[in-house]
Amino acid sequence: MTPKPLSVHMRVAVFAAAIMAVTFGASTPIATKFAVLELDPLLVGLLRTVLGASVALPLVLVLRIPLPRKRRHIGLLVLSGSCAFIGFPVIFAIGQSLTSTVHSGLIYAAIPILVGVFASMIERRAPARSWWMGGAIAFAGEAFLIVSRGGAEVSGASLAGDALVLASMIVLSLGYVIGARLTQEGYGTWGTTFWGLVAGGIMLAPFVPMAAAGTGWEEAGAAAWGGVAFLAVGSSILAYVCLYWSFGKGGIAKTGMLYFLAPVITGVLAVLMLGETLTTPLLVAAGVILGGVYLAQRQ
């Protein structure tokens, strides 16, 4: 579904919402790293969704946000919520505990490509040749980053961690596209975000006590819990509201282009807040990845 031409004011609003979504998304590896340094990664992934759902549930009740009525829309809501609020948080938290924040930030650059591929599949349209060329180059950069280890001896990154982060990006991108499709078909942005998060929280809540047992979570400090709080509210609510709205109004593939800014934001924050190092192999991988993403967006 191609969005209608937008007014200047609406284009500015879409751009602002997309930038906010990207900024929250780019900050997610930082918050996750702070959390997993003191808390069990599986517990962090579960708490992110469960605590986010505890915030979302009162909002849907007070605001009287309805569930979708059409069977197709219910199916899309379940699929998008499963990807965005169950699969992604758990896989990403475990992966982030095994790799550096800079590495995961660069892997985030695959999102525009993955979103474009899934959007093309769902919308049944073939991407331009430049898309495939750019996608191949970007993933070549991802492969170089993961296989060459891109400064892993300095940053503490691991092959398993990078692979898990990449897998979480695939799951997340699919959830983005399905959720955006739902909003394009008329279901509200808030409903897509809040009800998806509530459903995910209900399904994951029973596993929290088991994940917390014997992990020493009581000893975690303010930085770790602050990271969890940011993930629950900033990454799981505000980011998705902005993203689904901007995707629904501005188009999935076009607006998704802005996600190539995420690695830059993550890299800067990782250096400033976590003291991570930007090595030469890592910078080479960054250039290849971002170059491929840029080429893929030139249609």
Image (tube, rainbow, N blue to C red):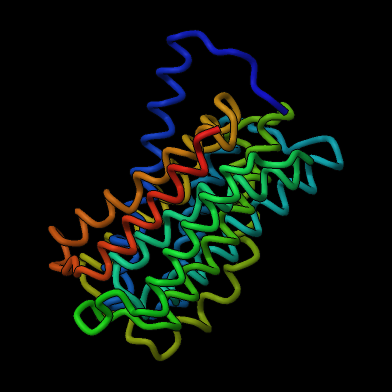
Q: Does 201 appear above or below 247?
A: below
Q: Where is residue 30 in the image (x, y as percent from the top left)?
A: 28, 61
Farthest bottom residue? 214
x 82%, y 35%: residue: 69
Q: Tell me if 66 is positioned left or right of 292 in this view.
A: right
Q: In which quarter of the image is the N terminus?
A: top right
x 46%, y 66%: residue: 47
x 40%, y 72%: residue: 144
Q: Is 151 or 131 nearer to us in this picture?
A: 131
Q: Is 98 or 111 nearer to us in this picture?
A: 111
Q: Does 224 appear above or below 174?
A: below
Q: In which quarter of the image is the C terminus?
A: top right
Picture quadrant of residue 38: bottom left
Q: Position of residue 64 (x, y in %)?
A: 63, 31
Picture quadrant of residue 250: top right
x 37%, y 71%: residue: 145
Q: Is 63 or 182 nearer to us in this picture?
A: 182
Q: Is 291 or 201 nearer to us in this picture?
A: 291
Farthest right residue? 71
Q: Can residue 103 be seen in the rendering of this structure?
A: yes
Q: Tell me if 14 is positioned left or right of 187 in this view.
A: left
Q: Does 191 appear above or below 279?
A: above
Q: Where is residue 295 in the image (x, y as percent from the top left)?
A: 47, 43
Number of numbered labels in the structure image? 0
Q: Tell me if 10 is positioned left or right of 182 in this view.
A: left
Q: Can residue 46 be seen in the rendering of this structure?
A: no
